[in-house]
Every structure is written in C-alpha cells, then in structure tokens.
Image (cartoon, rainbow, N blue to C red):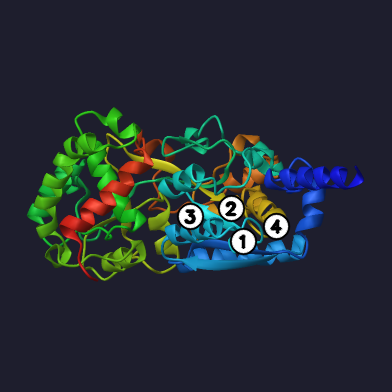
Amino acid sequence: MRRTVLTAAALLALTFQALGAGSPDPSKWQDVLAEARGETVYFNAWGGAENINAYLEWAGGELQKRYGIRLVHVKLDDTANAVAKVLAEKAAGRDESGTVDLIWINGENFASMKRQGLLFSPGWAEKLPNWKFVDVDGKPTIRTDFTVPIEGLESPWGMAKLVFFYDSASIDAATLPKSAKELLAWAKSNPGRFSYPQPPDFTGLSFLKQVLTELVSDPAVLQQPVDDTSFETATAPLFAYLNALNPLLWRSGKAFPQNYPAMKQLLADGEVDIIFAFNPSEASSGIANGELPDTVRSFVFPRGTLANTHFVAIPYNAAAKAGALVTADFLISPEAQLRKQDPKIWGDPTVLAVSKLSPEDKAGFEALDLGAATLKPDELGPALNEPHPSWMERLEVEWKRRYGVAN
C-alpha cells in the first residue's frame, strides 16, 4: 500500500511540474528577487544598432548592481532564429533549462510562439510591479500584438510608428510625397533616390505592409488570417506597385540595403533622399549620435502610417525565469524608459503613461529634448492597424520569389 501511495505522490508531483508548479510567481515579488539573484539571463535581441546595444549594456550594469543579475545580450539578426531555437528544444523534450531566457519580440514571432505553446505562463506581464505605470488605456496595442491578444504573455518595452525622413538641405518639404501613390510618383521623378531594406528585414516588410494597407480595397481583410484567395486578391495592387517602383530604386532595385542602419547610411552618404524607420525619434537620435546631418527632418503620410508596440517575452523553458521577470520589470521602470526615450541614448518612445508617474519622474519626461527632427505626438497622424501576422509571413515568401536578390 505504501508503495502505491508513493507512486501516486510521485505522479502528482510530475503533474504539477508539467503544469509549471514551482515557477516564479511575479505576485510574490520578494521571492522572485531572491531567486533571481545570481542568475544569468540570456536576452536574445536584435544586435544591429550600436545605440541599442549600448543601452542594453547599461541595463545589464544596472541589473547586476541592483539585483545581482548577469545580463547577456545574445545579438540576433533575425528574431525568428531565437524562436526556432526554443521550438527545437521543445521538440527534443528540453522543457527545463532552456538556452533562451528573454526575447525581444512582436508580430509574427509572438504569434508563432503563442500558437506553439512556447511562452511562459499567461498573465505574468501584468503582475510586474512597474505594470502600474503602463499606458494601457492610451495605447491599445499594448494588449493586442498584430491583432493577436497578448493575455499577459509578453511585457511591453517600446512604441513604434512608421515615420519618413529626408534631408531638408537638399529637398523642398513642399515636394514630399503624402501617400504611397505619391511616393511612386516622386520616385519616377527622382530615380535611384529611394530604397527599402530587403525582406525578411522587419523594416523592409513594414514598408510592404504600409503600401498594402493603403492600396487594399478592404483593409478589414488584413485583420483576419490570410488564405490563398484573400492573399492573391488583396496583394495584387501591392505587387503592381512594386513592379513599377523597384526599377526606380537605388541601384535600380538590383540590390537592397540589408537593414535600417544600412539604409540610414545611404541617407548620410547622400545616395538616397528619403528613408523611414519604425521610431518617431530615430532621425533626432541619428543626429545626436553624429550619424545623420542636422538638417534631416521627419514627415508622415497625413492619412496614417503603421503603428505597434514591441515587447519582451519569456520562453516556457527558460532557465532563468526569475531573472527574466526582474529584467522585464526593470525595462518598464520610469528610469529605464526615460533613458530609452532620450534621442542621445536611443529615442525609443515610452510605453508608460506619464500622468501615472511620480512628480519627479514626470518632470524628467517633460524636460526631455526629443530633438528638432522629432514630430510632436499630434503631428504623427493617424495610426494604421498592423495586419494579422500571417500576412507578414506570406508577404516575405512572395517578395523573395518575385524580387529576391543576393546582397
């Protein structure tokens, strides 16, 4: 009888383990802090920009000093590589001690991880101590990622909106395009002076989604998962547009910049006249860091540009879950968010509601000089909804088939 009882107890323990029993609970924050001390957090995040890398180095120093956490920035050129690593570990039965503790993520990669059960338990993000400062009411994309409900499976880190840049020393602002169609007309008058990063680069795919959203006959179809019929019908205007645009691009569309930093360098070198980024402060940040001329300015399309939030997520099998929770909480602290929004540091817009902050922190944000090239919030124009993540996947495949080139 005793042997049977022990076996049942063992099975019960295994069941709780499979359900995640014993995982750190962010509602018991002091326990989380105690468990996190001494942990190493492997943060898989894009490593293609020096200012972002420097910011993460600063964050790592603060986490070590305050919480005894060692932050290792695993630099990615494609977030999908980290997702694939977690998926491979799950397929191999490695449900504990995974090699990825935290991922900078949004869009199709979040949807993929959620669909395949690769994320730490729902709700953790909204239990973080600094969640109380997050602007849930004013920024709807904090709870919906590319139409996919977040359910507390990832923590917001920064805001994004597609903004275009130009050098006012060489271009008259009155001639700037005000829509995707006008951009094509501008390219015809200025061949070789525009380009976009080659997909699967996120910024390049964002340009395709912007054009698609403007040209599609029924934007509502983009909020639903893609199918063969809807894809062919909805994207026909986009590919007709690209067929006309690509020969007019830098290097006649036979080569594309690899990513946003490479496109930014083309503007700095005077090889193109208009570029774009998913950060309203990017031009001011580039000026502050000596990467762009101080005559660069921003503009948007009056009828709207894409907007979203980017996040950090914890894989279900992360080895340092407690350390990852503390890291995610620190990244949405008023101090870390204020530093991140400074164009001299990064220029990434905050996810916090400044009105919720202490008088001291509120004053810090209000005193922040966002730079002459940064548009004011009321100048950014309407925010267009991101399509469902499945559209991004199909666009990438079809773009490669039609226009893919070797850089």
Give me the residue at 83% from left, 44% from top: 9
CB contact under 8 Å: marks 1 and 2: yes
| Disc number for residue 347 | 3
Q: Position of residue 334 (x, y in %)?
A: 64, 48
Query: Mark 2 and mark 3: span between their CA atoms?
Result: 28 Å
The residue singled out by tag 1 in the image is 98
Mark 3 vs mark 4, foreground winner is 4
Query: Does label 3 or label 4 sit earlier along the sequence?
Result: 4
Q: CA distance from mark 3 to mark 1?
A: 32 Å
Where disc 1 sits, the SS reads loop
Check disc 2 and report the residue beneath it. 315
Tell me which amino acid carries mark 3.
Answer: Gly
Q: List the residue tagged with mark 4.
A: 323
- Determine the residue positioned at 46% across, 59% down: 84
Q: Are marks 2 and 3 in contact (CB under 8 Å)?
A: no
* Mark 1 neighbour density, 10 Å: few (under 14) some (14–19) many (20 or more): some
Going from N to C along the chain, the mark reached first, 3 or 1, is 1
